[in-house]
């Protein structure tokens, strides 16, 4: 997908890259694939913002001997937090 949008102070081109598979879950009657897409945005402004990441899940389920595929289900990326220490 290639999209060019005009902005007041510049322009950018947005191009979604190939998805990155994060996890594949094999359940009793379905398979869930979780993947992430990162936008390749080129801005004409400086400094450019960091790339936007989106996460999706697709569920493949077997019903009456036939495989069904869900539409991509958007998710939210929850950043891990950890405890850190500073010493003088």
Image (cartoon, rainbow, N blue to C red):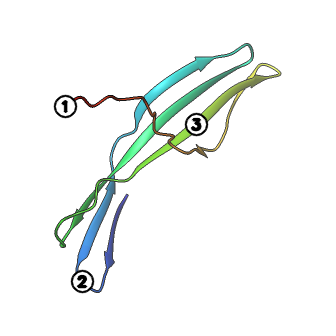
Q: At 46% across and 33% down in the image, what residue appears? A: 80
Left or right: 65, with 85 as reference point: right
Q: Which mark is residue 9?
A: 2
Q: Label 3 to label 1, Cα distance in Å?
A: 45 Å
* Residue wearing tag 1: 88
Q: Label 3 to label 2, Cα distance in Å?
A: 35 Å
Which image quadrant is residue 10 in?
Answer: bottom left
Residues packed near mark 2 inside 10 Å, few (<14), some (14 to 19) or many (20 plus)? few
Name above or below for residue 84 compared with residue 15.
Answer: above
Left or right: 59, with 62 as reference point: left
Which residue ends up furthest to the bottom in the rendered image? 8
Q: Nearer the viewer, residue 62 or 16?
A: 16
Q: Position of residue 61 (x, y in %)?
A: 71, 26
Q: Position of residue 27 (x, y in %)?
A: 68, 16
Q: Which mark is residue 72?
A: none
Q: At 59% across and 19% down in the image, what residue appears? A: 25
């Amino acid at each position: 997908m290639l999209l060019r949008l005009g902005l007041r102070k510049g322009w950018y081109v947005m191009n979604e890259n190939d998805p990155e598979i994060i996890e594949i879950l094999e359940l009793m009657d379905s398979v869930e694939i979780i993947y992430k897409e990162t936008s390749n945005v080129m801005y004409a402004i400086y400094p450019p913002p960091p790339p936007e990441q989106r996460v999706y899940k697709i569920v493949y389920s077997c019903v009456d001997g036939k495989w069904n595929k869900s539409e991509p289900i958007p998710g939210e990326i929850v950043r891990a937090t950890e405890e850190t220490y500073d010493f003088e």
